[in-house]
Amino acid sequence: MNKRYCLSLLAVVVCTLQLVAQDRVSVIREKLLNRDESSVIVASHRGDWRNFPENSLAAIDNAIRMGVDIVELDVQRTKDGVLILMHDGTLDRTTTGKGKIAEVTMDSIAKLKLKNGCAIRTVHKVPTLEEALLHAKGKIMLNLDKADRYFEEVYALMQKTGTTKQVIMKGNKSAAAVKKQFGKYLDDVIYMPIVNLDKKNAREQLEIFSEGLNPVAYELLFVKDSNPLPLEVKKMLRGKSLIWYNTLWDTMAGGHDDDMSLQDPDKGYGYLIDTLGCRIIQTDRPQYLIDYLRKRGLHD
């Protein structure tokens, strides 16, 4: 086998892998747009933060390697207007720095190191949103949390990086407010309303959103199983919108969280899927959830 042939073969393999990665994002987006209920979409909270610092490029990479479909990331803005990935409004908890992000410039933040989940300094740096968009391009869908505060700037970066169809936004704004702020972007950016099913006007909110925006999915919240609405909503939204539940802690989905699922996944994840019709789960245990779903034939 000569050198030229080997190089040509390598180029074909690289191109194929790139196309597969790009196609994967298209497949996930199409599942969302088509309200596909044949499998369960997995969203990883702040990336794979149990193995790498939250909101780091490495945390995104490991989520991709696991087979996660959506990675949730948080957006903040520095003093000099640079959008970065970070959950808190301060640097103290997750970096080697201190102070409010809005009062620190990017050149100072670039010198810091991220801490891991045990508050130990790592080799990883704070990514800018632009770096994250380019890094994840074609590989995984992105749910940008807290980004609506700077949406015009965020969208400009999406356009610059060619990732406008790779981003999911969520929020608890009214349907009218969503139309006003995001209306002209909704052909590209997927918007999911957040509805607390424990609130008195929850059903009305769902009806208004369904009539006015026809969302691909809703993020739903409820504290206890004694609330009858989650069961009713399953029937109400079937074939119209997918249902997203969070299993990060017990008060988000009636106690059917990651902790319950570690003891008995059928009572945790299984209940949300089978009884409540959930088809998108955001978790802090992505590998555990994916393994469970694959055993049930519910994840590619």
Image (cartoon, grey):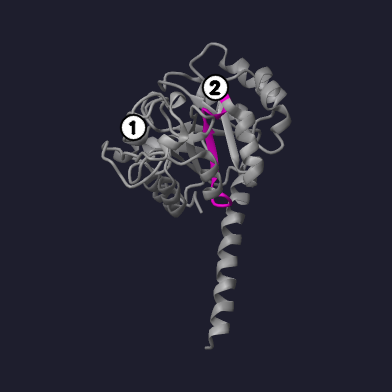
Q: Which quadrant would residue 271 be assigned to in this image?
A: top left
Pinpoint residue 21: horizontal percent, then vertical percent: 56, 57
Horizontal relation, residue 83 to residue 119: left or right = right
Q: Earlier in the sequence, mark 2 or mark 1?
A: 1
Secondary structure under the numbered disc 1 in the rendered image: loop
Nearest to viewer (mark 2 / mark 1) = 1
Residue 286 in the image: state x and y as whole percent: 40, 44
Q: Mark 1 = which residue?
A: 97
Magenta-highlighted residues: 137-149
Label 1 is placed on what type of residue?
Gly
Residue at the image point whose x is 41% and y is 51% from the top: 62
Which numbered circle lies on residue 195? Answer: 2
Question: In the rendered structure, does residue 139 fall within the stretch colored magenta?
Answer: yes
Secondary structure under tag 2 reads strand
The three-letter code of the residue at mark 2 reads Val
**How many other residues sit within 10 Å of disc 2, few (<14), some (14-19) or many (≥20)?**
many
Question: Does the stretch in magenta take in 264?
Answer: no
Decide if residue 238 is in sight here.
Answer: no
Question: What is the distance, in whole Å, between disc 2 and disc 1 at their CAs?
Answer: 36 Å
In the picture, residue 289 is in which quadrant?
top left
Spot the residue most to the top: 200
Residue plotted at (61% across, 32% down):
153
| Residue 236 visible here | yes
50 or 158: nearer the viewer: 158
